Image (spheres, rainbow, N blue to C red):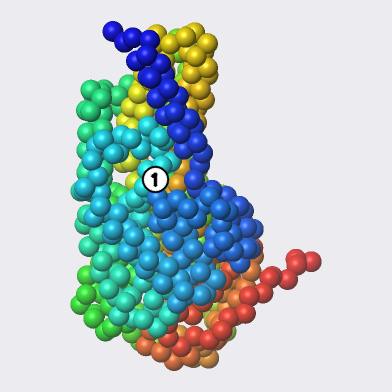
Amino acid sequence: MLGIGSSARLCTLLGATMTLCVIAGCRTYDIEPAVDYYRAGNLAAALADVQDPPFTRGHYAHDQLLWLLEEGKLLQDLGRFEESADKLAAAMEKFRYIEEQQASVSVSEELRVVLQGLIWMEYRANFALGVHANTMLALSDLAAGRPDNARASTVEAYNWQLEIEARRQKELDRASEVGKQKKLDQAELISQNQSTLAARYLDDAFMNSAYLSPKHDYLNPFAIFVSALMKIINNDMNGAETDLRLAEEVVPNPYMAQLRDGSLDPRGDTVYVLLERGMAPRRVEESIVLPTPHLGITRVSWPRLQFAPREVSHVEVATSAGEVFPTKPLASFDRIVATQFRHDLPGILTRTIIATAVREGASQAVQHSKADENVKAGLNILAQIWKAATSATDLRTWRFAGSEYQLAAFPRPADGQLDFNLMSTFGQPARTVQLQVGPSAVTVVYIRSIGTKTFNVSAIHGGAHAAEDTAPEPTP
C-alpha cells in the first residue's frame, strides 16, 4: 500500500502530467480561415494565410504534410504550376518518409500520443490520398514543362493504388495492437460502439449513379486517366489503351469509349478538357458527454464527414460551328474520401475508446489516492479539464482538393475558337471563358471551379493560348 509520501508523489506526477496534456490538447491545425477565403473565390488571400500562418501553425512538424498539400494545391489553382510542383513534390517526399518511419514506431509511442490527444499524431495521409496528390503533381509538372517528372509521378501513383488495400489492413492492425496493450478487444469495442459512433454519414458520396462501380472504392479513375494521358503525349499507345480500358471499367465515360474504339484519334489534333469542381469533404466533430463516478464527466468525440454543397454541374465547351461538348463524370473524390474514411473508422474508434478508458482510469487513480482531500479536490478538477482537453478527435483532411473530376475530349475546331461555359446546378451558365487553341497533336486544358464565383481555365499542354474569364450577361 502506498504511504503518504508515495501518494503525494503520485498526485504531483499526475498533476504535472495532466497540466502538460491540457496544454497539448489545444488544436494544432486550423485551416478554416483559408477555407473561407477559398470558398469565396479569393485564392490569393487563402494562399497568403496558408503560407504565413499564425505562430502556432508553423511549429508543429506533425502537421507539415497537410500544409504542403494545401499550399501546393492552392498554387496549382492560381496557375503557378512550377511552384505548385515543387510544393507537391515536397509533400510526396514527406509522405514517403512517414510511410518508411511508421514501421519503427512502437505501440508504446503511439499509445502516448493517443493519450495526449489524437490531434498530436503525425498526419500520415493514406495511399488513396497519396495517389491523388501524385496525380495533381503530375499535372503541375506537365504544365511547368516537366513531362518526364509528370510521367514518373503517374507511374508511382499507379503502383500505390495496388498498395491501398494492404495498407488499410496494416493500419487496422496497428490500432488493434494498441488495444491489446491495454487488454481491450478491438472486435468487441467496434461491435459495441460502431452503431452508435460510426452512424450514417456516407450516403451523399454514393448518390451519383456514375460512381456505383465497386472498383471505385480502391481505384482512382482520374489518376488512371491522367496516366493514360501522359502515355498518349509520349506516344505510348499500347500503354494508354490499357489505362483507358481500366479507367472506363471503373467509371464509363463516352469520351474514353471514343478514344478506345477509334472514333476519336487520341493524337489527332485532339483537345482534352479536365474539370475539377467543388471542394473535398471536411471532417466535423461529433461528441457525447457521459457522467462518471464522483461527479465527473467523460467526453467521447469522433469525426464524421460533411460534404460540400454543389454549385456547379459541368462545363459545356462550344465551337463557333455550333458543336457542344459537355464534360462527363470521370471520378468522385467524395467517394474516394468516404470509402477511405469508412475503412479508417474502426481504427479511429479503437484509439478513441482506448484513450477514453485510460483517461478515466487515471482520473479514478486520483480519487483512490491517499492524498489530502483538498489536494484530491484540486487534482480532480484538473483531471476533468485534462479529459476534456485531450478528447478532441482528429479532423485533419485535405480540404482544397475538388469533390469531382470530369472529362471532355474532341477534335480541335478548324478556327481553334472555344467557349467554355460553366453550368450551375440549376442548368444555367454562370461564367464563360474564351480560349484560342492552335494546332497540336495533344492539347490539355485544365479547369478549376470551386463554385460559381471561380472559373480558372488553364492551358497546361499543347497549343492553347491565354484565356479570358467573363461573367455572363444579366438575364433581361
Instruction: Please rate how many residues cluster around mark 1, counting C-alpha atoms within 10 Å: few if below 14, some from 14 to 19, many from 20.
Output: many
* Element under disc 1: helix
User: Mark 1 belongs to which amino acid?
Assistant: Ala
Which residue corresponds to the image point at 41% horizontal and 53% vertical from the top-left? 61
View extreme (right): residue: 476
Give the image location of residue 59, x and y in percent: 47, 53
Give the image location of residue 465, x and y in percent: 53, 86
Give the image location of residue 472, x and y in percent: 69, 70
Q: Quadrant of residue 370?
A: top left
How many marks do you count on the picture?
1
The answer to whether residue 380 is visible is yes
Q: Is residue 63 above or below residue 135?
A: above
Quadrant location, the C terminus: bottom right
Q: In front here: 162 or 474?
A: 162
Residue position marked by numbered label 1 in the rendering = 338
The answer to whether residue 260 is visible is no
Which residue corresponds to the image point at 20% horizontal and 77% vertical from the top-left? 238
